[in-house]
């Protein structure tokens, strides 16, 4: 295989692995959108806080395997808090205030992180070995593999929980029709809270698996919210595993266009495709068509 | 009622900035990014300067024409954003009683904001912003009387040293990597100019850039590798530099990294870990207690802020020395008036013993055709540092004398 | 409120006086509040004022989160800066700035037009990111990240020092404000607001979606370009990174904080985002503002406690946020480092506590304190006029089919209605009546089959096309233009005639008293009448009424029957879906019955009432239902 082609494959693989992280954060968007028709525009900040909390827990001597669930519990609490503080009221009144309130809560999160943990980017310790693996001339690092495995595992776990546990089924009922769900004795508020908590936990988990690659810092996830949101919207906010494909596609497209056009233009082709995709299929590539009811 | 009227008056007086001038203090402003991506440099610079101020104030203050005056500090966060920096500059220059300003990390902020100081004739010492534009903007328009001084090894010197180092290592082909900010792009231009100046001994085989926040540099590095680069000359800041180092490790691309002083930032060294070893950069200061001159400052800093390592030692030491130089200038001017302080900065009589060097007349009368008149650092008081196991050490041990102060200009 | 002042002024006039006072105050301010800094802040405020007034056109009036404004602002700034570098005169450079934002803005509007909500936000955001990439990468033109420096030229030989430049910005703000008000209170502006409240209704009533969306966006972009032009002249140095997402978030917060759909709100927002972060860096002022904010936030919950109510979340959350801010301000070791966090807390308290922004809250208080002279109502004229009375087919639906998933909602339905006929459409819930009307009116595209209205075949699935063929409809689930008054709702639907004709339509529907009431304040029954008046105002040939009597009181139903009777007398063809059999019996010439998506009977109301299939459809064919059947028979008679 010639060097040029090998380089292209290397770029696509690296981008695709990182794209799994976009997909995981996008999955958090999908969870809250299904249950309450709102998403957290401060989701990236939850990712960042999750990573910092994980780092602190590891710092007080907890092993990695205990620090990650700890961060997820904290992430769930934060997700719950965002819903309670920023989203619930605005949604009851059917206005778009939640978009801004989630951004504002995120801004506060960054400021708090800057003052609690400092403004420095810090490395995130992991139990995986150093160095890279090589498959047919393509090098992949352990943390990158962990992102892919973690993202898929987390999504599969939540999907299973949605289908086979009572709270999961309740959340699905509320997504389908909150009023009917209420009539069946499901508290739609609790179901929405639950989905926000799960979304927060997923974000914190994403933080702990991304951090080994990107390092931990208050601005680590600034771009992540937008990328993940793009993935969620392009795939369709109700599309399930279409996310993974969209995430991999965006990640590789970014890397490849950066490689071929120069790194400054890295994001450009993806964005143009995004605008076109939206103009042609507003509901997302894998989304269901929206039917207006009157 | 009385209380509310008091608050109202206080509010109005601050609003209209007609607050009474306190006669027995010297007011100095420190500006820089205290939040956001370049905050580590801004905060270290500020804390270094604050250390100097507290030492001066503890000794009773500055002797200004016979009266001991304490320094009063005004801090402003410019967030590393140009617009905000311009407003901060407008605010400070409108205060009316500010003697001098120290700071600025981001070259863009200096380019956008410093004109307000120049209009008012307020003295500013730029540190640690190194981009060439912050001084050349004044020589370009031919400003006659300039109250802006720089206390940092500017990119011209740094690029010169980087290219020298590459030639010294016997390299022929290099790749230039830089970030997409003002700092990175002007660093790239300085490098290309220096390569030409030093006889074109190096061939630039790839020029690649990266954005702030990028963590995956594989693409840029593959291109550099494929084009056969023997070294990477790099201009960027900590987090992205670290990403380049880890990317190199991942690809097994084992060539030296030589770049601007930002390679000494702790967020590069700590994050890159073993991958950062061997990175080379110009340094004005090294956080090494075995260097006698630096030891008191390093210890005082560690003690004052309860840290074992300075986030950005160069910024901190420069902030400290700039403040010491300013205090001396105020003393020699015998006045808190910016115009007189400017004059004495251009002609300092006493040698100031700082953490970096013994500063003997670092600046001279401004000459628009020669920016060096308002630049404190020369090639001769800058050394090459090297990352070794999480610390910066001298790359060429023969240069230790420079840091000990045996060879200032 | 315990007291109020009666003012012999109309609210509009009062607003105009206040605006003039504000601007004369701002213009004289540099004489009192000296200094470059004050001028710098005031100039920035004026520039952001223009920018936010533009942003309000999309975020406020159109109701879509537009994340491209900061980038358009940047494009305008670069356009002007490059024009000045090319030594173009200042007025021309300003025009170049406007064009530099307007042209890409309109280009973006085209693909973004079909989108709403998160999708719209995302497409504007993508555009914004692309613009910044473009500015950063086109080094040969824009000088990339190194930035572009310019020197402010003179305006027609007048040297623009900072005071004069401030006055120029203030003048531009004044004009932008005035023009926006003029534009957004015109029929065009009403249409934009109608579009926000119900895009379905604006399409069905022929107001149009795309055109107005594009125009709102174009107006916003032009103002962004103008503001950008001033920005370039103000600072004289541009860098692409300054026009990214960070600025956009601040702008969005400013709009919401100040108050949407209101130029005062945009101005207040601009004042807040320029002054607050900069004033917060003054320690004394900072503590003062935090304390003041805390005190203000605590008033509503205390009032609630006094009237023995539990304070709501809306009242308590701002107190919590401001308390955290106060604690930080008093105890944090370095307040400067917490500045952003405290700014966020301020914003949180304001957005939760003041949903209509500062301007909205102040307007509400002023309206309570001051009674303005009411705007006089226009004289009514016009009303229902006889339609063309030729004979023939008014409406023909042939073999229409539509299924959703596996459900055949409409299955091979053919329906003919003659001109001037009033045709009833009945059937049990879920029988496909509304879907049929949705197919005829173009809301849904049929899977197969065709529709013909007055000899024209509208494009399947296009409300607008069906409207142009001569139909108009009302909706079972109301589609009011909540932000508009009753009178405005009519005006926006009119093809011809002015305000007095609009009043005439309200008269026809018996709503003349409610002309100045906002739809959000009207009762359910009144809104149903307003929907009919709206449809009538478009002068349709065929009027489709979807359950107009649903949820109405007995007296209202009598009013409704009278209204429909007068429409019928004028010769307008009517398709009426209704559950109230007495209404059907009284009004309809012919009735069609649907069940399970199919036509099961057709005839006069009398014939249909006796049809066995119809009775079965309503009650099932089960023998046990015999009792119920006879009951129903008595009910129907």
Image (tube, grey):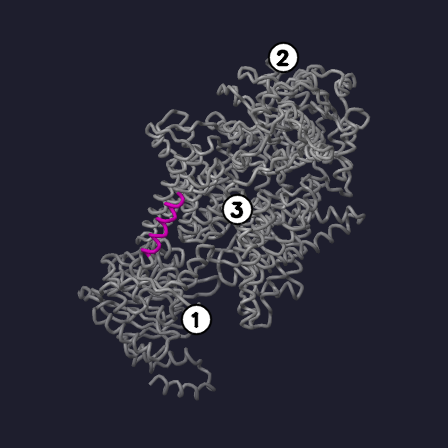
Magenta residue check for C19 = yes
Q: Are marks 3 and 2 on the same chain?
A: no
Residue underneath mark 3: C276
Q: Residues within 10 Å of mark 1 (few under 14, many from 20)?
A: few
Q: Please tell me whether mark 2 sits on a helix, a strand or a loop.
A: loop
Question: Which of the chains bears the disc numbered 1?
Answer: C
- Specify the farthest residue to the top: B199
Between A28 and B101, which is closer to the camera in this rendering?
Answer: B101
Question: Can you tell which quarter of the image residue B193 is in?
Answer: top right
Question: Which of the chains bears the disc numbered 2?
Answer: B
Residue C609 place in picture, x, y as percent: 33, 81
Residue underneath mark 2: B198
- Specify the farthest residue to the front: B66
Question: Can you tell which quarter of the image residue A163 is in?
Answer: bottom right
Q: Residues within 10 Å of mark 3 (few under 14, many from 20)?
A: some
Q: Quadrant of the N terminus of chain A?
A: top right
Instruction: Indicate which label's residue lies in the foreground, 1 or 2.
Output: 2
- The Cα atoms of the two marked residues, 1 and 2, are separated by 85 Å
Residue A98 place in picture, x, y as percent: 53, 55
What numbered label is drawn on residue B229? none
Instruction: Indicate which label's residue lies in the foreground, 3 or 2.
Output: 3
The span picked out in magenta is C12-26
State left or right for residue B122 relative to residue C383.
Answer: right
Residue underneath mark 1: C430
């Amino acid at each position: 295989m010639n060097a040029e082609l090998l380089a292209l494959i290397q770029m696509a693989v690296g981008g695709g692995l990182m794209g799994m992280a976009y997909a995981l954060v996008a999955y958090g968007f999908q969870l809250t959108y299904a249950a309450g028709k709102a998403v957290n525009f401060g989701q990236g900040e939850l990712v960042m806080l999750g990573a910092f909390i994980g780092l602190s827990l590891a710092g007080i001597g907890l092993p990695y395997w205990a620090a990650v669930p700890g961060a997820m519990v904290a992430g769930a609490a934060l997700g719950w808090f965002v819903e309670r503080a920023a989203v619930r009221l605005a949604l009851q009144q059917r206005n778009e205030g939640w978009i801004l309130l989630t951004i504002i809560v995120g801004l506060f999160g960054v400021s708090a992180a800057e003052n609690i943990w400092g403004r420095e980017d810090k490395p995130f310790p992991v139990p995986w070995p150093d160095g890279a693996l090589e498959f047919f001339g393509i090098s992949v690092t352990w943390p990158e593999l962990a992102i892919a495995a973690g993202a898929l595992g987390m999504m599969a776990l939540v999907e299973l929980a949605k289908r086979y546990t009572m709270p999961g089924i309740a959340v699905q009922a509320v997504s389908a029709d909150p009023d009917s769900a209420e009539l069946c004795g499901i508290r739609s508020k609790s179901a929405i809270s639950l989905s926000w908590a799960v979304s927060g936990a997923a974000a914190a988990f994403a933080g702990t698996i991304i951090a080994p690659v990107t390092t931990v810092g208050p601005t680590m996830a600034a771009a992540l919210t937008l990328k993940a949101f793009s993935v969620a919207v392009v795939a369709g906010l109700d599309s399930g595993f279409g996310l993974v494909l969209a995430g991999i596609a965006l990640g590789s497209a970014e890397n490849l266009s950066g490689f071929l056009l120069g790194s400054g233009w890295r994001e450009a082709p993806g964005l143009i495709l995004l605008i076109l995709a939206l103009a042609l299929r507003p509901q997302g590539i894998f989304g269901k068509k929206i039917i207006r009811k009157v | 009622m009385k209380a509310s009227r008091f608050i109202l008056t206080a509010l109005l007086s601050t609003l209209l900035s007609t607050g009474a001038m306190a006669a027995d203090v010297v007011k100095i402003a420190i500006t820089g990014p205290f939040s956001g991506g370049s905050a580590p440099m801004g905060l270290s610079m500020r804390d270094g300067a604050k250390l100097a101020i507290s030492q001066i104030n503890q000794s009773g203050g500055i002797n200004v024409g016979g009266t001991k005056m304490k320094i009063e500090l005004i801090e402003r966060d410019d967030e590393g954003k140009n617009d905000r920096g311009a407003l901060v500059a407008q605010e400070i220059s409108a205060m009316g009683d500010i003697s001098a300003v120290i700071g600025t990390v981001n070259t863009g902020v200096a380019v956008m904001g410093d004109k307000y100081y120049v209009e008012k004739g307020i003295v500013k010492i730029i540190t640690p912003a190194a981009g060439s534009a912050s001084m050349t903007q004044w020589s370009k328009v031919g400003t006659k009387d300039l109250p802006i001084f720089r206390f940092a090894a500017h990119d011209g010197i740094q690029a010169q040293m980087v290219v020298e180092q590459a030639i010294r290592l016997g390299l022929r082909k290099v790749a230039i990597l830089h970030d997409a900010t003002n700092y990175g792009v002007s660093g790239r231009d300085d490098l290309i100019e220096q390569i030409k100046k030093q006889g074109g001994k190096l061939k630039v085989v790839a020029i690649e850039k990266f954005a702030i926040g990028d963590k995956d540099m594989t693409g840029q590095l593959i291109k550099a590798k494929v084009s056969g680069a023997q070294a990477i000359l790099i201009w960027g800041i900590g987090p992205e530099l670290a990403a380049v180092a880890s990317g190199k490790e991942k690809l097994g691309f084992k060539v030296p990294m030589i770049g601007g002083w930002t390679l000494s930032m702790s967020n590069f060294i700590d994050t890159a870990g073993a991958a950062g070893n061997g990175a080379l950069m110009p340094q004005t200061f090294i956080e090494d207690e075995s260097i006698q001159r630096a030891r008191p400052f390093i210890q005082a800093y560690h003690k004052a802020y309860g840290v074992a390592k300075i986030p950005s030692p160069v910024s901190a030491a420069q902030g400290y020395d700039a403040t010491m130089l300013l205090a001396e200038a105020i003393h020699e001017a015998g006045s808190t008036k910016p115009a007189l302080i400017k004059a004495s900065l251009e002609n300092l009589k006493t040698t100031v013993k700082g953490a970096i060097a013994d500063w003997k007349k670092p600046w001279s009368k401004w000459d628009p055709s020669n920016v060096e008149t308002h630049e404190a650092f020369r090639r001769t008081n800058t050394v090459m540092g090297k990352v070794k196991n999480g610390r910066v050490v001298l790359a060429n041990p023969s240069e230790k004398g420079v840091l000990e102060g045996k060879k200032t200009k | 409120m315990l007291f109020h002042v009666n003012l012999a002024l109309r609210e509009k006039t009062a607003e105009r006086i206040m605006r003039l006072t504000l601007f004369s105050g701002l213009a004289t301010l540099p004489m009192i509040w000296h200094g470059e800094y004050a001028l710098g802040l005031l100039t920035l405020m004026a520039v952001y004022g223009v920018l936010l007034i533009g942003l309000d056109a999309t975020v406020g009036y159109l109701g879509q989160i537009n994340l491209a404004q900061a980038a358009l602002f940047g494009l305008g700034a670069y356009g002007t800066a490059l024009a000045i570098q090319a030594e173009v005169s200042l007025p021309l450079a300003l025009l170049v700035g406007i064009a530099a934002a307007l042209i890409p803005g309109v280009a973006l509007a085209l693909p973004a037009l079909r989108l709403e909500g998160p999708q719209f936000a995302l497409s504007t955001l993508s555009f914004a990111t692309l613009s910044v990439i473009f500015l950063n990468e086109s080094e040969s033109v824009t000088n990339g990240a190194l930035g572009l420096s310019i020197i402010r030229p003179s305006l027609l030989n007048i040297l623009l020092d900072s005071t004069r430049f401030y006055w120029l910005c203030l003048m531009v703000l004044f004009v932008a404000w005035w023009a926006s008000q003029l534009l957004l209170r015109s029929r065009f502006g009403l249409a934009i607001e109608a579009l926000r409240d119900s895009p379905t209704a604006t399409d069905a009533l022929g107001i149009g979606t795309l055109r107005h969306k594009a125009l709102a966006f174009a107006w916003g972009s032009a103002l962004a370009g103008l503001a950008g032009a001033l920005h370039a002249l103000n600072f004289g140095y541009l860098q692409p990174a300054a026009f990214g997402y960070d600025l956009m978030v601040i702008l969005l917060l400013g709009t919401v904080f100040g108050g949407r759909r209101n130029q005062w709100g945009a101005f207040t927002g601009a004042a807040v985002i320029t002054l607050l972060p900069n004033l917060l860096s003054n320690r004394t002022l900072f503590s003062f503002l935090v304390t003041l904010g805390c005190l203000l936030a605590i008033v509503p919950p205390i009032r609630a406690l006094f009237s023995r109510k539990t304070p709501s979340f809306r009242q308590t959350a701002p107190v919590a946020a401001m308390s955290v801010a106060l604690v930080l301000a008093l105890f944090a070791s370095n307040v400067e480092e917490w500045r952003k966090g405290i700014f966020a807390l301020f914003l949180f308290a304001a957005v939760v506590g003041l949903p209509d922004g500062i301007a909205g809250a102040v307007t509400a208080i002023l309206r309570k304190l001051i009674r303005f002279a009411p705007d006089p109502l226009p004289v009514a004229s016009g009303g229902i006029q006889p339609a063309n009375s030729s004979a023939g087919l008014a409406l023909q639906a042939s073999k229409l089919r539509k299924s959703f998933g596996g459900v055949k909602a409409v299955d091979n339905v053919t329906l003919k209605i003659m001109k001037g006929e009033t045709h009833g459409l009945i059937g049990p819930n879920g029988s496909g009546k509304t879907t049929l009307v949705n197919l005829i009116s173009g809301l849904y595209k049929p899977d197969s089959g065709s529709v013909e209205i007055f000899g024209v075949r509208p494009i399947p699935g296009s409300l607008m096309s069906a409207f142009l063929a001569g139909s108009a409809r009302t909706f079972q689930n109301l589609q009011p233009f909540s932000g508009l008054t009753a009178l405005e709702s009519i005006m926006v639907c009119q093809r011809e005639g002015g305000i007095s004709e609009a009043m005439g339509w309200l008269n026809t529907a018996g709503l003349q008293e409610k002309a100045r009431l906002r739809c959000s304040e009207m009762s359910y029954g009144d809104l149903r009448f307003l929907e009919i008046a709206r449809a009538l105002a478009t002068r349709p040939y065929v009027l489709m009424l979807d359950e107009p009597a649903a949820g109405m009181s007995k007296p209202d139903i009598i009013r409704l029957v009278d209204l429909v009777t007068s429409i019928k007398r004028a010769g307008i063809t009517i398709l009426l879906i209704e559950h109230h059999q007495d209404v059907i019996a009284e009004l309809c010439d012919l009735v069609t019955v649907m069940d399970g998506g199919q036509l099961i009977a057709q005839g006069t109301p009398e014939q249909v009432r006796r049809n066995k299939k119809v009775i079965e459809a309503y009650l099932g064919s089960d023998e046990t239902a015999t009792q119920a059947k006879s009951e129903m028979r008595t009910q129907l008679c």
